[in-house]
Amino acid sequence: MKEYTFREVICQAMSEEMRKDESIYLMGEEVADYNGAYKASKGMLTEFGAKRVIDTPIAELGFTGIAIGSAMNGCRPIVEYMTFNFCLVGIDQIINNAAKIRQMTGGQWNCPVVFRGPTASAGQLGATHSQALESWFANIPGLKVVVPSNCYDAKGLLKSAIQDNDPVIFMESEQMYGDKMEIPEEEYYIPIGKADIKRGGTDVTLVSFGKIMKLALQAASDLEKEGISVEVIDLRTVRPLDYDTVLESVKKTNRLVILEEAWPFGSVASEITYMVQQKAFDYLDAPIKRITTPDAPAPYSAALFEEWFPKLEKVKEEIKNALYLKA
């Protein structure tokens, strides 16, 4: 085991796969000469050269289309967006081409491409740079959506995403690139579509994913001191979603709280709530609680942003409410 930062394990995952397969390449804004906008491709230009680590213009529609076309013709591109907010310029390419080409060609072509970059908020970046779009992409058949919460998961999941023969949306966070964690020196993979129980518990199930998992784990740790046992599930993959792990946990704890850094309407939390009520309603001893951001764009003001983003005390309060306890 050795300690690495989140940005380092992203670089390791890409580099390890590129050493095995010359059809894999990385393209995006500042990925080459600048070592990546967040230094997640540091040293890759030197190792792999300009034909496989490619700086692009600020033209997401263009290089998204190039990546998809090359994927249909034998390459396995990794596309880095400086932020997933910018990919909206090229979202037609992702949804109407990458996600559908396998079906529309009767399986004659596939599209092994990874679209990766930061998602959701990262402090005072304003409304147009602070959008959690996981549920948007998860709504599209043909796309896989991965949102890791830590360094270990990020490396194993990214390696699996690069080897996948279908398009994968791999969503990170600016606020996680400096996170550190010990990970194995030997190679490993984590299967896409399998959630992870980060903390066992018996009183209530708390489901989350991405960087806000830190809040979930902190809430569980704090509540343990009050005698409340919280089982924390990290989805890791939003699509395919591991319904079975969530259902088995709810059948054990009989209560469910979902924490998500996203707007409430049409959220991942909404999908999980529906699924649990359909398949485990008789096991529920309390209504399902959902914690999201307010149904409004992220504010720029530091004071307003603090009110907008889910708080630790709010998470603990909702868990207690699910247990019919008073905060």
Image (tube, rainbow, N blue to C red):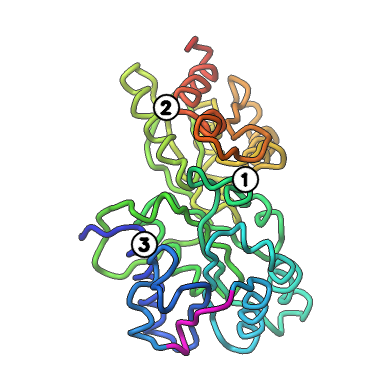
Dot 1 amino acid type: Ala
Which SS type dominates the magenta stretch? Answer: loop
Dot 3 amino acid type: Arg
Residue receiving disc 2: 202
> Foreground residue, 217 or 194?
217
Dot 2 amino acid type: Thr
Quarter of the image with the N terminus is bottom left
Query: In the image, is residue 266 above or below residue 34?
Result: above
Query: Residues under labels 2 and 3: Cα distance?
Result: 35 Å
Question: Residue 314 magenta-drawn?
Answer: no
Are there few (<14), some (14-19), or many (20+) residues within 10 Å of tag 1? some
> Foreground residue, 2 or 203?
2
Question: Mark 2 against mark 3, which lies toward the viewer?
Answer: 3
Q: Secondary structure at mark 2?
A: loop
Residue receiving disc 3: 7
Give the residue drawn at x 55%, y 78%. 56
Name the residue at the left extreme: 1
Q: Which mark is residue 288?
A: none
Which quarter of the picture shows residue 267?
top right
Residues shaded magenta: 50-57
Give the residue drawn at x 65%, y 55%. 138
Residue receiving disc 1: 127
